[in-house]
Amino acid sequence: MFHNSKAFVAVTVLLVLFAGSAYSFGITAPLAQPLGISAHDTRFRSGFAALSAGRSLLKGPCLSPLGNSPVSPFAWANFPSINVHRKQTLRTGAVQLSAVGGQPQQRPSGLRAQPFDLNAEPSALSPNRALPRVRSSSLSQNVWVGKRGDDEVAADLKRKAATLFSSQEQKTLRKLREKMSLTRRKSTNAKASPKAPTTGDEQTIMERERLREKLALRKSGGTRAVSHIAKTNNNFKGPKAQLKGPSKSADSSRQVRAAYNNRVSDHPEMRESSPSRSSGEILSMPRSLASFNHLPELVDALEPVLASSAEHSLEDLVGAMNRIRRLAKRGTDAALYHRQAVLMKKLSGLVLQRMDRIPGKLLSLAVNAVAEMRGNERWMEAAASRAKKVLQEGNGGLDMQAVAVILNGFARAGIRDEVLFGELAAEACRLAEEQPEAFGSQSVSVMVNAFAKMRIKDSALFERLAAVAMLIPAEEFSAQSVANILNAYAKNEEMHEPLMVYMSAVVRQLDHEQYQARHLSVSVNAFAKLNIRDEALLAYMQHAILARPPAAFDVQAIANILNGFGKLQGDSVDPALVAHMSAAIARTPAKHFDPTSLASILNALIKIEHLDEELWGRLAATAKKIDPLLFDAQAVSTIMHSFAKAELYDRALFERMAMTVGEMQFILEAQSIALILNACAKANYVNKQLVKHLSRVARQLSPESFSSQHVDNIVNSLARLGIRDRALFQHMAKVAQALDPAEFDAQAVAVTMNAFAKSMVRERVSQEIFAFFSSEVLPELTSEDLSPTSVSVILNAYAKTEIRDPEVVHMLCQNMLSGGPAGLDQFDARNIASVLHALATLYVEEPEIVNGLLARLVREDPAALEPEEVSIIAWSSAVLNVQDPRVIDWLLQGLAVHLPHMDDNFRRQAHQFVLSCELEGFERGVAELREKLMDHGTGSSVVTHSRLQKDVARVLAEMGLEFLEEYVDERSGYSVDVLMSDKLTAIEVDGPSHYARGTHTPLGNTLMKHRHLSHLGFDVRILPYWEWDELKSKEQKKEYLRHLLTSTPTLIYL
């Protein structure tokens, strides 16, 4: 009828306006029919687009009929029809029409709508789909819908739109604006209500239903619409659409429904409110869900079914859920994942409504489907309650398979319901006793794995299932079931030796080609955890591993294999296996490593003592490439500890690990802190900032967080690093005293005491911790607990701190005499030197121990000992005044051999031994050794003047007595504190350092000096510090000195 598109636009607009239905789009078809225009004629839709464009130009942007989404004025032509049941006055910012049902939706008047891209492809604009908020690239301006934009925005919009219309078209549209304004005012003043449907309205509804069916058919692939907007020479050309619809026979509702059921739109919004299906239509569940092999087809089939009001059976619902779960494992895109998640939520909700009626076997299948669904907590809680009720009913509602599936489902969901697991375990035991033949390898592996995964121990169940598993023929086992059973028993620490023997036989009967790398690694690791060393099994596993290419093993499998063989075979692991795993490591890209697996591999390489520098260098480079945020404290500590133990110090790696640890605080635990500090100590890596950070974190941890091993590792590491962190030592002392004394073994006691003795030698905290060990821990140790090293270290710690506890020393000596691991015959030269040095320093007389150790010693070749060992033993013998000629001769021989290799400190000790021999009358070999000492020199001792000694000298001077301070005897090398003018009377001013801490008992070195001076002819007078400190006045001090000098000599040595 119309061949000029512009004329068509104008006439159509005027007809719509004069009909009084400018905003009631449902009557456009009746108005068009008298003109011979089809409701979905392309030209009619083009005219409607022009109407919309005109409104946009004259008044502002148009409201979208599709919910809250704005729409371009030129995009309306792409919609086949706009369905409105009610006539409603459109007010920007007030009311907007819905595309389905025509119900107005209120929106706050101050709310701006979203911008819309005027250049969007028409095909992207589909009904009932929320349109994206994008920015127009051609207009360079957001078009706001609902509330009028600023004048500047409106002006810019008009300028842009003006390029699309000729001057005559703009004039027509201005007139149209005036008429539309008049119509709106009349409608507002009259407050008209929607009219009742007329005959024309009924025809419109019928036409709308036909359009719905055609739209559904077109969306299902039967119809294809192509439209576009073209701009040429600033002339607007309406959209061209080619509607290649089906034949008239295809318009029947049955064919349309079939097409819609086979394929629906890809958009969830289209499915939820699709105009092709009425809400009351009932659809049944597809009968053969197993025939669907692709998730999109299944989702397309289920969506309309669930949208209908049909009642579905529990079997159908559970079957649909399981089919979706099975097909979803194959991977989906984001849109499809969202669709299937919506379906699963609907299906599980329907099952939840009837949870109290679902039978046990069907419940197990439902749990299997829902286990890994997000937000399933409430559903799983209801399922647990239902499972318990089914078990209480006791009518056999759950068979073996159902029990296994429910256990597996809750384990996969990570829900640790110990009550449910206990009841299911009891039911499994009952079934295993009544129907053991019903169990297969898969069901056994599933049950035990569920308990292992949730860390729930049930020895009765594991014992019963072990008996059942041994009844299953070996040929019925798969590699996966064997690996799962072994892993479960190892993880739960359930050692069942007959089962392990049977599993070993089963493994060797299976063809090694059935094993995947994962199965091999898990099986090897399980046998290692259970400490089952079966050489035939290990040989079979090694053969299976070597039969697979290195690329078949991931980092976790590599770690498990190396750790398993390392634990069972140590450094005797076959080099071929090590080389194969090294090749696997080399082929694995750095991006595939995670901190935990890398740490596990390094720890395994330490176990098998494989220290290939190239391999370790590659692993160090990999560790430095991993994102620091992925590390946990355990991985960092293991990596640092492994490199330190391998003595492969990579400073850059340690710096990166220190930086990573510096960002940690709350995830650091006592074990991680201990391992990190221990690694730093072994590598001699001193990082004070790192130690400060770890110290601050450790002091915030409660004593219950630590074990005795943590304590000894931390304090020992600080001592080795030479870091005296008083606050951390005090905290560790409190932790140690809060622990159960039985937790400390002899080694932990020795290491802890030695660390405090080395770093806190004069601190009160060392006295407190030593008192704790002396009274609470050491008395409980037996000879079986002790070793020569622990005994020597403990005694040496007492000597370093100068804490004298004769009872503890005697107790340890008695353990040495009783034989056993700490018997005298087990002590080597280093241990003997430490024990004798401790006894000499504290001057604890234990002649039986001394004689026994020296008798053990003289059987050794002195040349085989270290120089410092010979020197210490000689000095200790001099302090303890050993007179055994055999020992003296042995020591003289050893000193003659090792003297050239000693430093000044050890030569001074040798000099005191030689002096003691000379003073005691030993002559053989002494003179020759004296000459060697003179040739090498003994070094000069440092002379100090204490405050006490200065005070004594000042009082003597006030008394008018002549004396010399720090007189050095040339023969002995001793420095006499005060030598009176007669050259014989010597006053030894002994301060606190000459006595054991907290006592008035002289130390061994002090007693030996007094004895030697006396033998040299000096009249030795002892002035102890505590007697002098009690004197308050100078007269009292003078009287004290007169009495000291005139009384009988303090020491008389015969």
Image: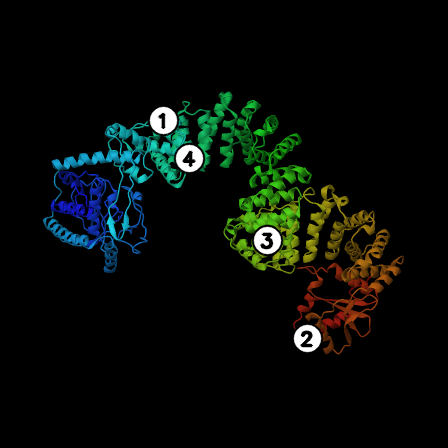
Q: Is residue 333 found left or right of 942 in the rendered image? A: left
Q: Nearer the viewer, residue 542 or 607?
A: 542
In the rendered image, which quarter is residue 510 located in?
top right
Q: Are marks 2 and 3 in contact (CB under 8 Å)?
A: no
Q: Residue at x 46, y 25 (%)?
A: 400
Q: Secondary structure at mark 2?
A: helix
- Looking at the image, tell me whether mark 1 or mark 2 is earlier in sequence order: 1
The quarter of the image holding the N terminus is top left
Q: Is residue 685 found left or right of 275 in the rendered image? A: right
| Structural distance between the alpha carbons of marks 1 and 2 | 108 Å
| Structural distance between the alpha carbons of marks 3 and 4 | 42 Å
Q: Are marks 1 and 2 in contact (CB under 8 Å)?
A: no
Query: Furthest-right residue in view?
Result: 924
Q: Amino acid at mark 2?
A: Lys
- Looking at the image, tell me whether mark 2 or mark 4 is earlier in sequence order: 4
Label number found at residue 1034: 2
